[in-house]
Image (cartoon, coloured by chain):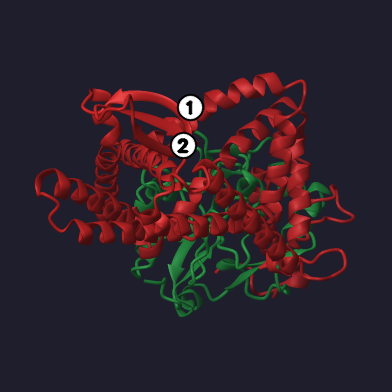
Chain colours: A red, B green
């Protein structure tokens, strides 16, 4: 592929350098998370040693995610969008409007998944349920595992809990209060959301013909199976201690730990990585805004506007970095990128048609009919 | 299951009669149901009946996939360039603008790029793509090399295209005169000659008058 032929100005493959940067970035991020765990748990005084497996899986996931993200950012098109996205967002004259838009888009695009609902209600519902289930579960699990949140009895009694964040008391609530019930069953509610979403997604994967032909086990089924396993084993723990007097609790807790750790270890590799790629969509929206307000590129052939000039120039640079050579030296324009998509389609037909009407020198004189 | 390697896709725009059967049939394909991925261009309806069906050429080194910042476009081992993977596509429009054949479509409402995937649900089972199935003039033909050789003895298929300095090799083939002394179709060359008006009839058809698109 052209990208693999990409060389730096000295003619050396840049990949080892990128890899080193990615490894260092991953190590730095892992060290930061580890440091935050030590600080947030008050030198591990609130850290639950029983959860150390989760912690190490999270640290591994942190390294893997940052490593892959850094490698991803080094791809020429990604690097270009990353750079331009921040440039257009931080332009002083547009910054206030962009900040307001950012919040609006955060709600509509990410929290509400507006664009997925438009693809289909079933798909939207599945994604929305899974996403919110995972967000709630992550919001509860990670701070608890890291010792960032812990609960202590309040008022020298056993009726109230005080929740502390990073060692600082935040609020108190009655153990038997409705708020306490909601908090202590937070993972249960999250499991219900995830299981419902997984069922909808599985239904689509088993019935929809487009999914049937394109899906792959590792990419499409494994994430759903992992999420389902985490949710079900988590719920079984609750069932065990609520209604079965702790029957098989140890077995269930180990099973649950295996599923959670497996999911954490899988985060950097498979479909889950889109959680970290997807926010780039916001940068694209700001890039499009800036492009729409700026100068428009006109097709060198039909002279109709078809994209922003910024986009065309950036694409020419990206293609050059990727090793493509669409330059049109000595022609009516300097680069094929300046031809609009419609003229490209028509021009291909013209090129083919001209061959059939070519001068006799290029053709067998007896071959005058189209076979 | 991969697309059978002896089954090939052949395009001959000269045979297109503009009936739009391919456009309608395409939207019945299960991988993009309700959305037609075919561009049917009418060169100049006032002056000429010439129309052009455009499907994905499935490049060996697809520019659309290479310029995708989200790595959303994948090429299968059997050489079919798939439509954007939904969880990854960030609707940046890079692929739409970069494709040398002008194939990908941006579904703005759904913030998703969509393109012809050669009806992968059908071709991977040995069936013909929807468009080739319904095309009455066989401008879009899906079959073996032996079949096309037998049906069109005065034509031969070519799958190398030149765009400026860039050569693109494709899975889909285009029919050219059997005795045409060319190794590839030079799109830019033809475009330049066309704009140079060395062929008044074609020039008038595609340069002087506006192009009307049905897509």
Report the side of A176 relative to B105 (left or right): left
- Vertical relation: B181 (above or below) B46: below
Q: Give how far across and how far down residue B31 sits, in percent.
A: 38, 53
B24, A221: nearer the viewer: A221
Residue at 39% x, 24% y is A171
- Vertical relation: B135 (above or below) A129: below
Residue A265 visible in the shown view: yes
- Vertical relation: A163 (above or below) B24: above
Give the Cα separation between the discs numbered 1 and 2: 17 Å
Q: Give how far across and how far down residue B209 sits, in percent.
A: 70, 36
Tell me which chain the residue with mark 1 is part of: A
Q: Which mark is residue A107?
A: 1
Numbered disc total: 2
Tell me which chain the residue with mark 2 is part of: B
Q: Image quarter for residue A9?
A: bottom right
Residue at the left extreme?
Answer: A244
A202, B211: nearer the viewer: A202
Residue B135 visible in the shown view: no
Q: Which mark is residue A121?
A: none
A193, A145: nearer the viewer: A145
For the residue labelled by badge 2, is the local secondary structure a helix, a strand or a loop? loop
For the residue labelled by badge 1, is the local secondary structure a helix, a strand or a loop? helix
From the image, tell me which residue sits under label 2.
B110
> Are there few (<14), some (14-19), or many (20+) residues within 10 Å of tag 2?
some
Are the numbered discs 1 and 2 placed on the same chain, yes or no? no
Q: Give how far across and how far down residue B134 sits, in percent.
A: 38, 56
Name the front one of labels 1 and 2. 1
B15, A142: nearer the viewer: A142
Report the side of A120 relative to B90 (left or right): left
């Amino acid at each position: 592929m052209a990208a693999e032929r990409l060389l730096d100005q000295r003619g050396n493959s840049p990949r080892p350098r990128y890899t080193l940067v990615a490894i260092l970035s991953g190590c730095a991020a892992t060290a930061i998370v580890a440091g935050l765990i030590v600080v947030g748990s008050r030198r591990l005084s609130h850290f639950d040693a029983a959860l150390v497996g989760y912690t190490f899986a999270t640290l591994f996931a942190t390294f893997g995610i940052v490593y892959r993200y850094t490698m991803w950012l080094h791809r020429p098109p990604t690097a270009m969008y990353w750079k331009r996205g921040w440039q257009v967002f931080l332009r002083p004259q547009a910054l206030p409007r962009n900040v307001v838009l950012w919040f609006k888009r955060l709600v509509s695009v990410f929290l509400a998944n507006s664009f997925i609902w438009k693809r289909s209600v079933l798909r939207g519902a599945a994604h929305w349920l899974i996403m919110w289930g995972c967000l709630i579960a992550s919001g509860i699990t990670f701070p608890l595992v890291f010792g960032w949140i812990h609960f202590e009895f309040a008022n020298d009694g056993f009726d109230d809990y005080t929740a502390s964040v990073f060692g600082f008391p935040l609020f108190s609530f009655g153990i038997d209060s409705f708020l306490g019930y909601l908090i202590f069953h937070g993972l249960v509610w999250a499991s219900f959301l995830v299981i419902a979403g997984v069922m909808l997604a599985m239904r689509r994967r088993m019935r929809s013909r487009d999914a049937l032909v394109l899906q792959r086990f590792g990419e499409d089924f494994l994430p759903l199976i992992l999420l389902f396993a985490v949710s079900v084993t988590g719920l079984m723990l609750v069932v065990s201690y609520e209604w079965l007097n702790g029957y098989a609790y140890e077995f269930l807790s180990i099973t649950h730990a295996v599923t959670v750790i497996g999911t954490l270890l899988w985060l950097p590799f498979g479909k889950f990585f889109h959680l970290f790629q997807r926010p780039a969509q916001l940068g694209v929206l700001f890039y499009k805004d800036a492009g729409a307000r700026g100068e428009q590129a006109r097709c060198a052939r039909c002279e109709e506007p078809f994209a922003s000039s910024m986009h065309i120039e950036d694409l020419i640079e990206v293609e050059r970095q990727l090793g493509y050579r669409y330059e049109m030296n000595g022609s009516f324009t300097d680069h094929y990128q300046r031809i609009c998509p419609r003229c490209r389609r028509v021009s291909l037909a013209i090129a083919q048609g001209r061959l059939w009407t070519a001068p006799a020198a290029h053709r067998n004189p007896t071959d005058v009919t189209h076979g | 299951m991969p697309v059978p390697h002896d089954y090939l896709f052949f395009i001959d725009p000269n045979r297109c009669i503009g009936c739009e059967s391919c456009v309608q049939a395409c939207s019945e394909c299960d991988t993009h149901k309700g959305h037609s991925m075919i561009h049917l261009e009418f060169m100049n309806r006032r002056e000429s009946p010439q129309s052009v069906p455009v499907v994905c050429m499935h490049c060996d080194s697809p520019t659309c996939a290479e310029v995708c910042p989200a790595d959303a476009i994948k090429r299968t081992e059997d050489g079919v360039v798939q439509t954007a993977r939904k969880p990854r596509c960030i609707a940046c429009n890079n692929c739409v603008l970069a494709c040398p054949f002008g194939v990908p479509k941006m579904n703005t409402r759904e913030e998703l790029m969509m393109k012809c995937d050669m009806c992968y649900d059908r071709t991977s089972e040995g069936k013909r793509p929807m468009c080739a199935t319904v095309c009455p003039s066989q401008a879009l033909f899906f079959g073996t090399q032996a079949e096309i050789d037998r049906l069109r003895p005065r034509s031969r298929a070519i799958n190398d295209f030149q765009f400026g300095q860039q050569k693109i090799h494709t899975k889909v083939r285009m029919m050219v005169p059997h005795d045409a002394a060319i190794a590839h179709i030079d799109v830019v060359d033809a475009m330049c000659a066309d704009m140079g008006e060395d062929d008044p009839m074609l020039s008038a058809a595609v340069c002087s008058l506006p192009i009307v698109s049905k897509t």
